Amino acid sequence: MKNLKWKLLTIVGVIVFAAAMIYPPVDTPSRKGRISLGLDLKGGVQLVLRVKTDEALQYTSEDAAERLRLALREKNIAGPTITVSASAPTRIAVAGVPQPMDSAFRALADAQPELVAQYARNPAAGGYTFDLKPNVAQILRSQAVAQALQTVERRVNALGVSEPIVAPYGTAGDQILVQLPGVNDPDQVKRLIGTTALLELKIVEAGPAASQEALLQSTGGVAPPEMEVVSGADKTNPGSISYYLVRQVAPVTGRDLSNARASVDENNLPAVGFSMNRAGAIKFGNLTGQNIGKPMAVILDGRVETVATIQGRITDNGQIFGNFTTQDVADMSLMLRSGALPAGLTYLEERTVGPTLGADSIRAGLTASLGGLLLVAIFMLVYYKLSGTNAILSIVLNLLILLAFMSMAGAVMTLPGVAGFILTIGMGVDSNVLIFERIKEELAAGKGPRAAVAAGFDRVFWTIVDTHIASLVAAAFLFQFGTGPIRGFATTLFFGLLSNVFTAVFVSRTLFEFILSRREQPQSLSI
Amino acid sequence: MQIFSNTHYDFIKWRWHAIALSALVILAGAGMIVQRGLPLGIDFSGGTIVVFKFQNAVGEDAVRKAIAGVPGEKAVQQYGKLEEHSVLVRLPQPPGIEEGFSLEKDAKALNDAVKAANLGPFQEISREVVGPAIGKDLQRKGLWATLLSILGITAYIALRFRLTFAIGAIAATFHDILVTLAFLVFFGYDLSLNVIAALLTITGYSVNDTIVIFDRVRENMHTMRRDDLEKVVNHSINQTLGRTLITAGTTFLSVLALYLFGGEVLEGFAFTMLVGIISGTYSTIFIAAAVAILMSKRAAGPPAGAAAVAAQAARTGRPPAGKKTATGKVSAR
């Protein structure tokens, strides 16, 4: 008897705990709801992005190549050309090393820390190739993804979307999942997230010119070594484009910024003001101090935004101005603040669910759940009479515990998750039916109610364990391999199965024992 | 109240008919798949789905006409109930486009075309654009998830029961997956992520059902030592018949509620579950145990089979030399 009291107390305790866990289920003015809804129910945008990690490798190779060029120039070794191509981003190709210079070049290359640590050297006729070591490439790739993830996260947070999700995705290792609840226009978001926002400050060596040919006329139509042509809208002559010759490598980049904000230029037009961090201020001071009187280009993602003549040495502040709208300026400063992406991003998938569709789905899911529960309840009461209430109680408690589990695990309720709920109802019924049928059999075999209930539960216990473990195995694989909505389904199924073992075996049995304990010598059982 | 109590149907007798019927359905489905290809939804094949909700009653034909200019093999269908004025347009991924901003080209083109056709105010309530890279990834993952979960379940049954039973359960599971696939093809449903989730659930459900019977077989083997395996199995199926049918019935009811009220998004899921529950119950009764018996006989060696030998030995009261274990166990090995 004492035993029974403790069992009942345990059940009441579980109910109270579960109820506390899920209160309040939905958002109230004062508190946030405990059950968070997935995008398919709330409405919003889901994007799957891929980080072009090849680009990050190319940047690394170009960086190492540029250091090698500088070192060669310092030692006055002329002749070798050093290239990195987009088709082989992990390879630095050196050609035309003169025979007498060979040993000097080798010594120089051996003194380059990056080349020694990260690249494997392969001598070829008249030159060398340096190949990024595969393990280094792998590390750089994952670093690029991690960095992109952080950058995207900062940008998404800056957008002011509530409860965004930015997370690694898929098995390939280079994908990012972005979920933005409540956002209905994916286009602005995509632009903001996907822009590399690589800011470069470079001295203009030649230009502006109206065309690339005009710009390169003096050098025979090709850019001089280590130089490149960049272009941008001509601010004085709207609709036309100006071309400039600049060095390939930027002395100051967006990495040197500490802040960027919307401001106005001297004509009171929208502009982006930026400040340098400590290292950046030194570099910027050197650059501007050595080039007073020369024009400097502000280049964003390879496009010239602003060209201004350096009036004097500047260390800490600068401005990007041009024909910008207020929105342009706000977006640009957001992107600069959140930092440049280490490599370009591209979209693999986009799903937008409108809020009306989400609300419809919630309604449909609720109707289906309640409808299913009602149908099952009616059947159980008709077929198992009073014992049916036991089953209904244990199923309702099962759903309550399931909700509490989901709230504690921070799991998200998706539409397939609702399906998992309905399936949990089905599973709960199954276990109860299994037990009840067995009790009936035992009663038919001539056992008294108490003995029949005890035998029924004892005999069926291992069957229930076996069936549930088999289903848990399926749910675990679903969770492991599933993505997004499927994961929601697997989570509900998993927790539903767990709590069902408790409610069907423990709760239902205790209820039977409780009912039987109220009677002196029970002769019959309503089942 | 009691239905199907104390039944004595001879299910094992009907096993060849059952296997033939299942084979027929599966072959018909396979034939259609060979003919038309596996009906992969855009989750797996890549492509675009846009759902337009119109303020006025706008039919599928009007939308079809409006988007006639958009290249590609467009499928237009009513979405949800007629009074919701919603139309779904599906386009496969044009070849050559892998990723990036060009992915959404089709969705934009569809929106522009509908706008240009002056069909009255409308909203784009849902847009899904899936690139081929994601689809391939998912195809692989879905296949692995299915195979590994089946493997895991087999291992568990082999551990808790015996290998021949596990083979029977697996045969039933594959049967259910194949039959459900066949019905999906017959009724023109696409394989979406949700449908795959339903298929995986069915594997769990079907095995669930099978385990209940196997459990009873195991129990009965101790009490019915004098009978051969077929009789034990048949008796076990009959004993659990009420439970099998009631469970199937109630689960069917709750999924039916999902099918009827769950909305357009879950329709494919619910349909798959409905077919799977019927197939799962059928295979539990007719396929799983039948295969387990066949495998047991094969393992025992033709022609008489250990079961018959063991039963005979039990009748004459002289156990065959060297077999000290319970006859029921010997017969199933």
Image: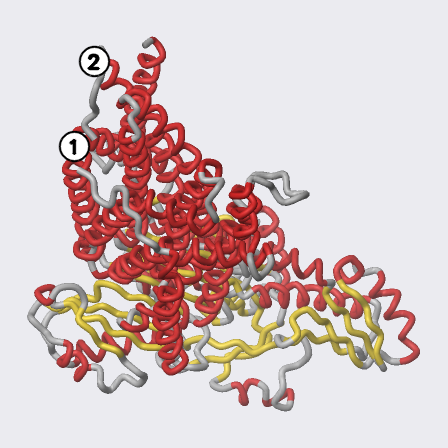
| Mark number, residue A5 | none
- Residue A378: name its quadrant: top left
Dot 2: within a 10 Å radius of its alpha carbon, few (fewer than 14), some, or many (20 or more) residues? few
- Subunit ID for the residue under disc 1: A
Residue type, mark 2 in image: Arg
- Residue B41: name its quadrant: bottom left
- Subunit ID for the residue under disc 2: A
In the image: residue A210, left or right of residue A330:
right
Q: Quick one: label 2 or label 1, which is nearer the N terminus? A: 1
* Residue under pointer 2: A519
In the image: residue A174, left or right of residue A227:
left
Q: Is residue A262 visible?
A: no
Q: Is residue A414 above or below residue A352?
A: above
Farthest residue to the top: give it. A2
* Residue under pointer 1: A385
Q: Is residue A106 above or below residue B308?
A: below
Q: Position of residue B113 (x, y in %)?
A: 21, 80
Give the residue drawn at x 21%, y 29%.
A387
Residue type, mark 1 in image: Lys
In the image: residue B200, left or right of residue A512:
right
Say which of A508 and B22 sits in front.
Answer: B22
Give the residue drawn at x 44%, y 43%.
B217
Q: Position of residue B248 (x, y in %)?
A: 28, 49
Q: Secondary structure at mark 1?
A: helix
Q: Secondary structure at mark 2?
A: loop
Give the residue drawn at x 13%, y 80%.
B62
In the image: residue B19, left or right of residue B260:
right
